[in-house]
């Protein structure tokens, strides 16, 4: 897009050092639009914001500060969406602290698509990865855009699943849109930019700062109708997103797991606190009253023709010795079967000589 004067004023307002969202909204309520804010005197401004900030605003737009963003906006599929724009996400207007502006790369129309957030552990298990991708694809095919935070693990799997479905996926970043974090998700970020969208409230050049990610999380939950936690330890940042979703009046869902897995503890805690237990995407669609639900949507699957060894393996991580005891097979026989199952994508090898069933 070619930036206009109004866009320049919104950018300049968002980049005033020390001026937070609350103060910006107070200024907008008083002066109605950014142009009038920058035309106001120091005396007028200091009635709304501290004198130091009022002085910075009264000095006018520092073009060198906004030039990098103006140049970025000239790029294909790069957008700045402001609180005054008609296509600013309507769901975000319902939260207590909506961002003043959103940098968007990709399909701008997805900002107001019905959406569901999927979050979880960065150190996810193979089963968690499979569940996240399966749920995301089914929800996307049902018409819900999948939101997540582009982290490794569950987030990345959710984006992949969402992109494979009909309603695509949107990643909300905790950095500027000119930085891909983590770098290993660069290819996924390009796929999202081409077929979904990348969104951030943070100015270009903003690096990965720990305090920015909880702020990012409120946007993920705020744009969604509900939030699904796939895997999470009790100290997981995903539980912050779930808490924010509850505070924002969104539905919270959690997938149960093994009682022995640390990555199930957070989900089980959420369920104890009232989150909806989700065994399939259909559970979520029915709970939110979604009318476009396909008749049969399953979690990462079941297979009646699976090897008998899968029955002995169960769904908890298991080692070779235990499998030998359960199946009454020799170690060589068990290893041979596990290799075939792993090549078929039915079993994953875990650190420490453990194996886990995927389907």
Image: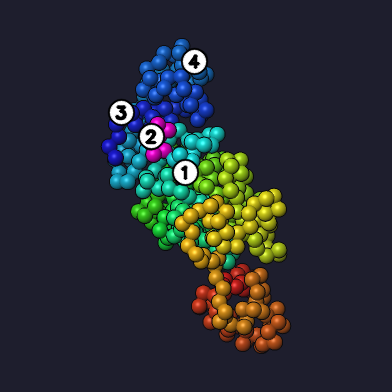
Viewer-nearest of discs 1 and 4: 4
How much space separates mark 3 and mark 1, taking CA atoms? Answer: 26 Å
Residue topped by disc 1: 175
Residue topped by disc 4: 46
Viewer-nearest of discs 4 and 2: 2
**Residue in front for this viewpoint, 258 or 72:** 258
| Mark 3–mark 1 CB contact (< 8 Å) | no
Q: Answer with mark 3 or mark 1, whichever residue precedes in sequence.
A: 3
How much space separates mark 1 and mark 4, taking CA atoms? Answer: 31 Å
Reply yes or no: does residue 245 show up in magenta. no
Tell me which residue sits at (55%, 65%) in the image.
Answer: 299
Viewer-nearest of discs 3 and 1: 3
Q: Answer with mark 4 or mark 3, whichever residue precedes in sequence.
A: 3
Residue topped by disc 3: 5
How much space separates mark 4 and mark 3, taking CA atoms? Answer: 25 Å
Q: Is residue 243 visible?
A: yes
Badge 4, how many Cα within 10 Å: few under 14, some, many 20+? some
| Mark 4–mark 2 CB contact (< 8 Å) | no
Tell me which residue sits at (49%, 36%) in the image.
Answer: 93
Compared with 230, 36 (above or below) is above
How much space separates mark 1 and mark 2, taking CA atoms? Answer: 23 Å
How much space separates mark 4 and mark 2, taking CA atoms? Answer: 27 Å
Viewer-nearest of discs 1 and 2: 2
């Amino acid at each position: 897009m070619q930036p206009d004067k109004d866009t320049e004023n919104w950018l300049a307002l968002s980049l005033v050092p020390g001026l937070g969202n609350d103060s910006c909204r107070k200024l907008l309520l008083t002066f109605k639009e950014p142009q009038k804010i920058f035309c106001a005197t120091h005396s007028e401004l200091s009635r709304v914001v501290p004198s130091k900030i009022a002085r910075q605003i009264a000095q006018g737009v520092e073009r060198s500060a906004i030039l990098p963003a103006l140049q970025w906006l000239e790029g294909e599929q790069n957008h700045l969406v402001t609180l005054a724009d008609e296509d600013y996400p309507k769901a975000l207007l319902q939260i207590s602290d909506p961002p003043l502006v959103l940098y968007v790369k990709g399909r701008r129309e997805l900002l107001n698509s019905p959406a569901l957030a999927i979050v979880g552990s960065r150190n996810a298990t193979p089963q968690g990865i499979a569940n996240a991708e399966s749920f995301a694809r089914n929800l996307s095919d049902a018409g819900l855009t999948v939101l997540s935070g582009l982290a490794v693990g569950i987030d990345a799997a959710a984006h992949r699943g969402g992109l494979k479905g009909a309603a695509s996926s949107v990643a909300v970043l905790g950095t500027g849109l000119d930085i891909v974090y983590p770098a290993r998700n660069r290819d996924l970020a390009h796929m999202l930019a081409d077929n979904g969208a990348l969104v951030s409230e943070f100015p270009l050049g903003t690096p990965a700062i720990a305090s920015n990610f909880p702020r990012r999380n409120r946007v993920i939950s705020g744009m969604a109708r509900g939030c699904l936690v796939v895997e999470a330890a009790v100290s997981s940042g995903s539980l912050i997103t779930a808490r924010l979703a509850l505070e924002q009046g969104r539905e919270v869902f959690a997938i149960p797991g093994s009682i022995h897995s640390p990555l199930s503890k957070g989900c089980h805690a959420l369920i104890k606190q009232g989150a909806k237990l989700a065994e399939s995407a259909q559970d979520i669609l029915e709970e939110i009253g979604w009318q476009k639900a396909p008749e049969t949507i399953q979690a990462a699957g079941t297979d009646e023709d699976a090897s008998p060894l899968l029955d002995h393996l169960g769904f908890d991580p298991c080692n070779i010795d235990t499998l030998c005891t359960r199946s009454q097979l020799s170690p060589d026989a068990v290893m041979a079967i596990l290799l075939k199952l792993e090549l078929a994508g039915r079993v994953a090898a875990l650190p420490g000589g453990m194996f886990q069933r995927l389907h």
